[in-house]
Amino acid sequence: MSWSAEKSESCPSCEFQGNLNILREIYFFSALPIDALKVFAYLCTRENFKPGEYLFTQEDDDGQAFYLISGEATLIRSDSGSEVIIRNYTAGDFTGALTLLGNTRRLFSLKASTPVTCLILSRERFVHAMDQYPQLMSSIFHAVIEKIHHWEEHFLSDRSEGCNACKQKIGVSLI
């Protein structure tokens, strides 16, 4: 168990403050007012994963968003019985924002490569909190739209130039 996880177990207010600081850094939450962030920080949980354990698996609708506090995980796509490594996630990476907004099955699996500690927010808890702050949904949608636009802009400038098949698939920001 990492030092921060050990410290958090003996100091719940330290864990809450740590959760709050993390949420302030995540694009999905960073524009929200502090009172709403405090609610989300309280609703988040921390979970440890051993190497080889799955944070989530392809085809599941687990309804959870993950922020890696420590460790490394590998994003995997299974096609026709073979696994393809897509990328690695490290401390500071956030995934699963869209699962908070609605039912969506995972297109990938995320597997711990090293011991991993995550901050997790479930869709159920997110929806419950949003019931208290419905006016914040526009800020959250704006954050997601900006992230999609930024991703596609980055993809266009870095990866699509030499890939004709990629050029046929771009346009996610047009939806």
Image (spheres, rainbow, N blue to C red):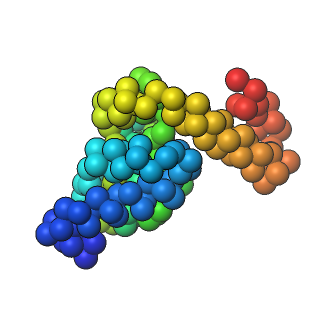
Rendered position, 142 above or below 117? above
Residue 95 seen from this side: yes
148 or 36: nearer the viewer? 36
63 or 106: nearer the viewer? 63
In the current view of this chain or complex, which residue is farthest to the right? 161
In the current view of this chain or complex, which residue is farthest to the bottom? 3
Rendered position, 107 above or below 50? above
- Identify the residue at horizontal 25%, vertical 76% (top origin): 3
Rendered position, 29 above or below 135? below
Q: How many marks?
A: 0
Residue 75 in picture, x, y percent from top left: 46, 50
Residue 76 seen from this side: no
Quarter of the image that includes the C terminus: top right
143 or 78: nearer the viewer? 143
| Left/right of residue 150 with respect to residue 143 in the rendered view | right
In the current view of this chain or complex, which residue is farthest to the left? 10
- Identify the residue at horizontal 58%, vertical 31% (top origin): 138
Quarter of the image that includes the N terminus: bottom left
| Left/right of residue 77 with respect to residue 46 in the rendered view | right
Residue 43 in picture, x, y percent from top left: 28, 44
Q: Indicate the quadrant where residue 64 lies.
A: top left
| Left/right of residue 162 with respect to residue 53 in the rendered view | right
Rendered position, 126 above or below 161? above
- Identify the residue at horizontal 51%, vertical 34% (top origin): 136
- Identify the residue at horizontal 30%, vertical 34% (top origin): 125
Residue 122 in picture, x, y percent from top left: 32, 37
